Amino acid sequence: MGKKQVRHSAELQGTVALESLKGLKMVNELASQNQVHPTQISQWKRQVQGGATDLFANGRGMGTQMRSQEHSEFRQTLQQIKRYIIKHTT
């Protein structure tokens, strides 16, 4: 019997991905601290990096190729990342 799939909050995903992008801690260290698999952190990091590209793709905001649900989830994650940055840089 396999493990039950865990749904991590968008806030956790954004926070961990941002920490990984900063490069101040190793992925394995972040995984241990947040009780997630290192591969999951790498996926979240790629999503943020890819999303940042889409954000500026057409000069007016989000890229047009994102499906509605992905768009909504991505916007939520971006908002949480913005709040995290504001909270930790002031």
Image: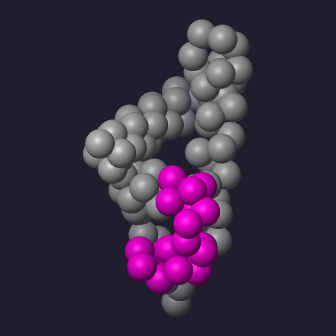
**Residue 31 belongs to the span the image colors magenta:** yes
**Residue 66 belongs to the span the image colors magenta:** no
In the foreground, 16 or 35 = 16
Q: Is the stretch drawn in magenta largely helix, strand or loop?
A: helix
Vertical order, 1 against 88 (above or below): below
Q: Position of residue 35 (x, y in %)?
A: 43, 79
Q: Position of residue 58 (x, y in %)?
A: 69, 13
Q: Residue at x 33, y 50 (%)?
A: 88
Give the left or right position of residue 86, taking residue 28 as reference.
Answer: left
- Res 80 → quadrant: top left
| Residue furthest bottom in the image | 1
Q: Quadrant of the C terminus?
A: top left
Please name the colour scheme applied to the rendered image. Answer: one colour
Q: Position of residue 60 (x, y in %)?
A: 60, 10
Q: Which residues are magenta?
A: 18-37
| Residue furthest front in the image | 90
In the foreground, 88 or 56 = 88
Q: How many marks?
A: 0
Vertical order, 64 against 70 (above or below): above
Asked whether residue 58 appears in the rendered view, the answer is: yes
Give the left or right position of residue 13, taking residue 40 as reference.
Answer: left
Q: Position of residue 51 (x, y in %)?
A: 62, 36
Give the left or right position of residue 84, taking residue 30 as reference.
Answer: left
Q: Residue at x 57, y 56 (%)?
A: 22
In the foreground, 89 or 31 = 89
Asked whether residue 76 appears in the rendered view, the answer is: no
Vertical order, 42 against 89 (above or below): below
